[in-house]
Amino acid sequence: MSRRPLIGYALLLLVACGGADPKDAKGGGGGRGGAQVLPVEVSAAFTDTVIDAIIATGQVEAMQRIELRPDIEGRVVDILAREGATVGVGTPLLKIDDAELKAQVARATADRDLARQALERTRLLLAEKAAAPADLERAEASSRAATASLDLLALRLERTVVRAPFAGVVGQRLVSMGDFVNSQSRLLTLQTVSPARINFAVPERYAAELKMGQEVTFQVASLPGKTFTARVDFVDPVVTLPGRTITVKAITANSGGTLQPGMFLEARLATAMRANAVVVPEESIVPTAGATYIWVQQDSTVTRREVELGVRSPGFVEIRRGIEVGDRVVVGGLERLVEGVTVKATTVERRPKGAREG
């Protein structure tokens, strides 16, 4: 077999390889000298007022809540207030059978009247020297005892009507008509609605920052989009174990009765305010293992800066170190960035209402 055709093919391959355009060997994009240009979105760092706050979870509770129990045993003969009703102090809620007590009161009334009559006769006899002073003393004692017995029975009769000890809302009723109840029986619950109280626990390291009268803002999971305010009225002087937390309670108006006891909440307790903090959009933050960075535009390139984060708010973060007001931080197109890469920047507005330029 002849080798000449093979030599011819080899020459053709060499010509093909050598004829490539030298510019194509550099590859690349449309930047200066063929360097790659990446599109990014940038936004200027700005100043705003930020508030340091303790974040804690807790629940709504009633200022006062009680499970009513009867002072008198007997059968329930009337339900006088429905569940969920708003009642005032002294409102009748429930009636217990009083027939037997009424009879006892009638008998005690007669006994008291007889004792008073006997006392009057003894006084007349003593005036006529027909009775001894000791007889008068016994008659007076008998009269007082009869009156006390009547007063006691009258009080028991009055307590067959269970009344509201404070103004509030009737909760769950735990008995029905005809039930026999005694002093251990739970009848119904009563609780205040307005004002209400919130209860939450904070780590003990914040003990020095807890003060009476501090404002608390909070949101309730079941009422999204609504923010409520309260004022601290109790800071527990004892640290709770094993979590080493301090119980804090605050009063909120709850004038509309929207908040209900037991609702889960997230509370923010303000501890400090900074009026000229540097703030950037949250999407500019690049967290890594051990440090946090932000890409900053410098002319047509970007550089990475390590930063110290501060207070977070929805969509924005305070920067305590590493960024100055006016720095153009990258908020879009971060995925392919490397130090010194050429970029084509588009400015976008990322700023909450009321924020200042600098």
Image (tube, grey):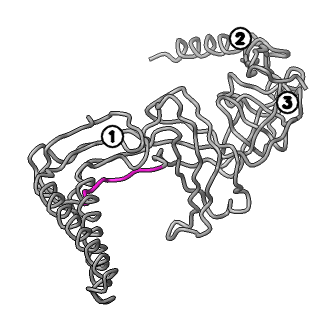
Q: Look at label 1 and name its amino acid.
A: Val
* Mark toward the viewer: 2 or 1: 1
Viewer-side residue, 127 vs 299: 127
CA neighbours of label 3 inside 10 A, class few (<14), some (14 to 19), many (20+): many
Q: Quadrant of residue 332?
A: top right
The alpha-carbon separation of the residues under discs 2 and 1 comes to 91 Å
Q: Residue at x 21, y 59 (%)?
A: 72
Q: Look at label 3 and name its amino acid.
A: Thr
Q: Is residue 324 left or right of residue 168?
A: right
Residue 224 location (% of width, % of height)? 49, 28
Q: Residue at x 73, y 13 (%)?
A: 24
Label 2 or label 1, whichever comes before in sequence order:
2
Q: Image quadrant for the N terminus?
A: top left
Label 3 or label 1, whichever comes before in sequence order:
3
Magenta part of the chain: 64-71
* Mark toward the viewer: 3 or 1: 1
Q: Which residue is mark 2?
A: 20
Q: Which residue is mark 3?
A: 47
Q: Which residue is mark 1?
A: 170
Secondary structure type for disc 3? strand
Viewer-side residue, 267 vs 308: 267
Label 3 or label 2, whichever comes before in sequence order:
2
Q: Look at label 2 and name its amino acid.
A: Ala
